Amino acid sequence: MVATTKPPQPSLSLPWKTRIHISLFSAVTEACSRKNGTVNRGLLKYLLDFRTPPTSKSVNGVASHDVVVDETRNLWFRVYVPTQHAGEDLPVIVFFHGGGFAFLSPDVEMYDVVCRRFARKVPAVVVSVNYRLSPEHRYPAQHDDCFDVLKFLDDEENRSKSLPENANMLRCFIAGDSAGGNLAHHVAQRACEFNFRRLKVIGVVAIQPFFGGEEQTDSETRLDGTPIVSKRRTDWFWKVFLPKGEGFNRDHPISNVSGPNAVDISKVDFPATMVVVAGFDPLYDWQKRYYKWLKESGKEVYLFEYPNMCHAFYLFPELPESGQLFGQVKDFIDKVSSNVATLLTN
């Protein structure tokens, strides 16, 4: 009789420092999410929303400044410029932060750090968007805000006042994590149907995008209670985000992007997409379905898996996997930019 051994199962691999940060973040956002569907913004500001000002002078090779698009809806973005690449033609990354559509902003420290890393590592000019949050503003406010930033940047006068001269709007990538990954997909889809004059979206970076549906998937059941994401929490986020007048249905195409009410994109010139998933993310199954749906729709799509990581792992620079992901984003942007340049010269 031949003895067989099972291959080792993946385990969540996080150092104690990261576990503490994640536990604190989860506890604060949980405490601020009221049962009546409102957010305790005062408590959130006191415990979590520590804001970082822009830096007009270069810090670690990146300078930043803020640009207001529409004061009436507090629509603005922060621009990150890698100062050591002033003479180079640079891609533009329009970035949408995560937070379940209800929390965080571009000037919260964790996202300020993330966008500085993107600007420096790729390198690229990064535009990080401050969109309206639920529950005060339900869908489609967030998606409208993010798309309106693209239209703002497509105007030459706005672009020249907001971005450096070496920012190439014909090499525009849309990126986001979690809820921002949801935004990235839908904003890119809208961009495919809009006649921009100077801006061209050529790639999407969807980092653990926040999708869902009426079905409870295996990963949602099996991984319920892992860091940051739980079924109860995602239910709360969808309830305070989805439009009121249409009834609460998580198979809405904005949440279940590849589900029964999905938009047919097979004939749409959807840009090349990289999808990042993690083995200990309860949203794993939804994200894998998104990847397969893009592939079956005939789109150029790449999957990057981190079997030992949880939701939002890349926000923690002490993790080696975080650095690996930034390297993969750089490689993806370089590859897509090169492919597009080759097509244009042929």
Image (cartoon, rainbow, N blue to C red):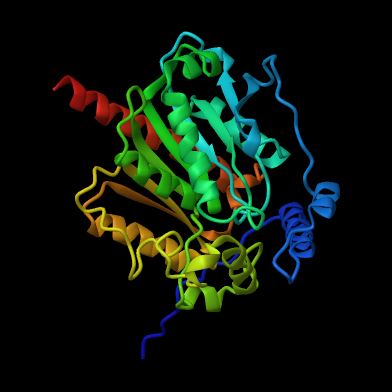
Q: Which quadrant of the view contains residue 221?
A: bottom right
Q: Front-most of 236 and 89?
A: 236
Q: Is residue 185 left or right of residue 223?
A: left
Pinpoint residue 256: horizontal percent, then vertical percent: 42, 65
Residue furthest left in the image: 346
Residue shown at 56% from the left, 40% from the top: 323
Residue 74 appearing in the image:
no
Could you say which quadrant of the image residue 23 lies in? bottom right
Asked if residue 131 is positioned above or below residue 228 in the image, the reply reads: above
Give how far across and how far down residue 15 sits, in percent.
70, 55
Is 13 in front, or is 272?
Answer: 272
Image location of residue 266, percent across then percent down: 21, 53
Q: Which residue is drawn at 44% across and 68% down?
A: 285
Q: In which quarter of the image is the N terminus?
A: bottom left
Q: In front here: 54 or 87?
A: 54
Residue located farthest toward the bottom when viewing the structure as drawn: 1
Residue displayed at 54% across by 48% down: 141
On the rendered image, what quadrant is the C terminus found in? top left
